[in-house]
Amino acid sequence: MNYIKPLVILGLFLSSQISFAADDCSYKVIKVKSPDTLTIRTGPGRNSQKVGGIPATANDVKIIGDAKQIRNSKWAPIKYNNIYGWVNRGYLKKDCPVITKNKLYHVVKSGEGLYGIARKYHYSVQQIAKWNNLAANDGISVGQRLWISPPTLSSRGGSCSDYKVVNVKANDFLSARSGAGVKNKLLFGLPANANKIKITGNEKRLGRSKWVPIKYLKMEAWVNRRFLKEDC
């Protein structure tokens, strides 16, 4: 049976109807033994058509919307290797970078290499290698900690961790969104005089602009980096 057409239709539907999750974590498959795979379906629930499978060792699955309760299980919309679909949420677990002060690092797991880790965090092998004093062809070992933050984040040394809003008029606000880019959902606005803002992760470049994940009071979102300035 040819699944190309249903997948294209499903991808278009999900990408146009579902907002991306606010966190930037990937998810890994759990409770599935190789060579079995986690089934991807066209919709939530076991009655929906099967369109593919995610390997038991996969760790770069993205949840792209809210989960739906179907009887005793929850189903989540996902993206995996450019395939959109739904999976049982009980077989996914967050696989986030570890945050320590202003740095982020990844703990190497069995079967991982520099290429896969770089792809997961949207950097090049050369960048990850440079930040960890490695050659691009160096081997890595299970349990090894690899820094995955660019110099702009990792070189501060903790001397300045707060930011304030700049380039925003007094009667206006800085838009805080659910993800990087203006197409993501507006969550709240930061006042023009807001300060004590924390940058919590890696910046993302979108065209000519850079976006960063932030925490303000107890709220988390993404903002355009151009409107923040260090407030030491």
Image (cartoon, rainbow, N blue to C red):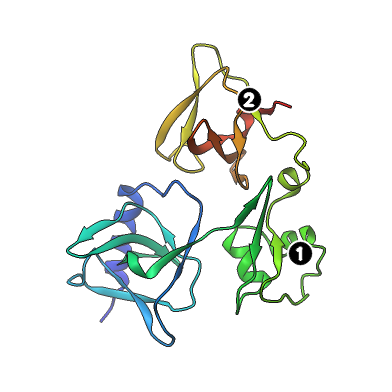
Report the residue at 70% width, 65% height from top.
145
Tell me the tag on residue 120: none
**Number of disc labels:** 2
Report the residue at 61% width, 70% height from top.
116
In this rendering, the label closer to the viewer, 1 or 2: 2
Badge 1 is on which residue? 129
Of all residues, the one furthest to the bottom in this rendering is 35
Residue 189 at what x, y percent from top left?
46, 26
Residue 161 sits in which quadrant? top right
Residue 28 at what x, y percent from top left?
47, 68
Dividing the image into 4 quarters, which one contains the N terminus?
A: bottom left
Secondary structure state at the residue bearing disc 1: helix
Residue 130 sits in which quadrant? bottom right
Report the residue at 52% width, 38% height from top.
222
Q: Is residue 224 above or below residue 57?
A: above
Mark pair 1, 2: CA separation = 32 Å
| Number of other residues with Cα within 10 Å of mark 2, as a class: few under 14, some 14 to 19, many 20 or more | some
Q: Nearer the viewer, residue 57 or 124?
A: 57
Q: Is residue 181 left or right of residue 136?
A: left
Between discs 1 and 2, the one toward the N terminus = 1
Q: Is residue 108 left or right of residue 70?
A: right
Q: Nearer the viewer, residue 72 or 119?
A: 72
Report the residue at 48% width, 29% height from top.
175
Secondary structure state at the residue bearing disc 2: strand
Q: Nearer the viewer, residue 181 or 44?
A: 44
Of all residues, the one furthest to the top in this rendering is 171
Mark 1: amino acid: Ala
Badge 2 is on which residue? 164
Mark 2: amino acid: Lys
